[in-house]
Amino acid sequence: MRLLLLLAAIAYHIISPPAELNQIKEPVRIIFDTDMGPDYDDVGAIALLHALADSGECTILATIGSNRSAYVAPSLDVLNTYFGRPNLPVGIVAGDKLAIPAGQKWDSMIVADYPFNLKSNQEAENATDLYRKLLAAQPDTSVTIVTVGFLSNMSDLLNSRPDKHSALDGKSLVAKKVKLLVAMAGKFGSDWNSFKEFNVKMDAAASINAFHNWPRPILYSGFEIGSVIFTGLPIANSSILNSPVKDVLPAVFQWIRKIRMVE
């Protein structure tokens, strides 16, 4: 589902009204916000993000964690470094927020096996400060935020006050600089009212604040879209060597098999 979300973000900008058809399309400016765990699909999403950047479809402004688990910033740095962008800004959600490790332990595995610079979350930037700095420096209504985790950073950004980066409060800064929020969140099928989607429920207060008060368009990718799509086997079965993306998958598949044997 996270891969679909990135494609949707790009497509939203590619599909243009007739008056814009003759204009040169600039790469989509993306801030990628992820819980980097507890599951492994974040790894596939960030791999696709870098592939889109390599093809000129987007420009990655930052990768930001909504999860305070110990390996989030190092894992992001491992993957950014592997894909040739070791200097990409990395942010981590502020305060006493969720800290959920990867159940399959792929996060500690790639940190042990691949080069990176950020040795801990403490070396990453404060997420809200990084958002404000990045948004203030971008053209008006030019930034797409893609969130594939908890909405904690979105809520904190909306609640932020004027600072050295901008005289605007958070909501006004979002209204001025953000074009679109693409959110992997919720479920929109017939049983939506009884389904507690993970990204929304884990920081429910932040989700309510973000979705009720976000001043720009939101594109939702519901659980029902991604739950029927399975990816990973082609790269897991490929001859690629020394890839953190590929290395994650066997560990995950082994973990899934163990769960199924117990069940």
Image (tube, rainbow, N blue to C red):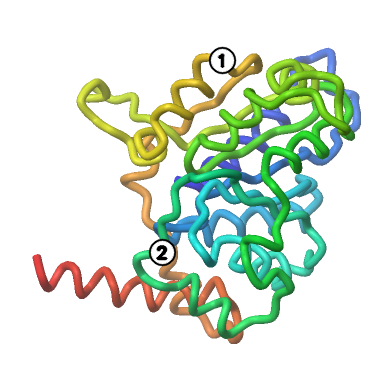
Left or right side of 62 for 198: left
* Residue marked by disc 2: 102
Q: Residue at x 65, y 30 (%)?
A: 157
Q: Residue at x 65, y 17 (%)?
A: 216
Q: Look at the numbered disc 2 and give the secondary structure of its residue.
A: loop
Place residue 260 in its image quadrant. bottom left
* Residue marked by disc 1: 213
Asked if residue 190 is positioned above or below residue 238 in the image, the reply reads above
- Where residue 234 sits in the image (x, y, percent)? 46, 70
Q: Which mark identifies residue 121? A: none
Dot 1 amino acid type: Asn
Indicate which disc, 2 or 1, sits on the residue closer to the N terminus.
2
Q: Residue at x 12, y 73 (%)?
A: 261
Q: CA distance from mark 2 to mark 1?
A: 31 Å
Which corner quadrant holds the N terminus?
top left
Left or right side of 189 for 167: right
Q: Neighbour class for label 1 at 10 Å: few (<14), some, many (≥20)?
A: few
Residue 253 or residue 206, whichever sits in front:
206
Q: Neighbour class for label 2 at 10 Å: few (<14), some, many (≥20)?
A: some
Which corner quadrant holds the C terminus?
bottom left
Dot 2 amino acid type: Ala
Asked if residue 208 is positioned above or below residue 90 in the image, the reply reads above
Q: Look at the numbered disc 1 and give the secondary structure of its residue.
A: helix
- Where residue 162 sits in the image (x, y, percent)? 80, 23
Asked if residue 55 is positioned above or below residue 135 in the image, the reply reads below
Asked if residue 214 is positioned above or below residue 48 in the image, the reply reads above
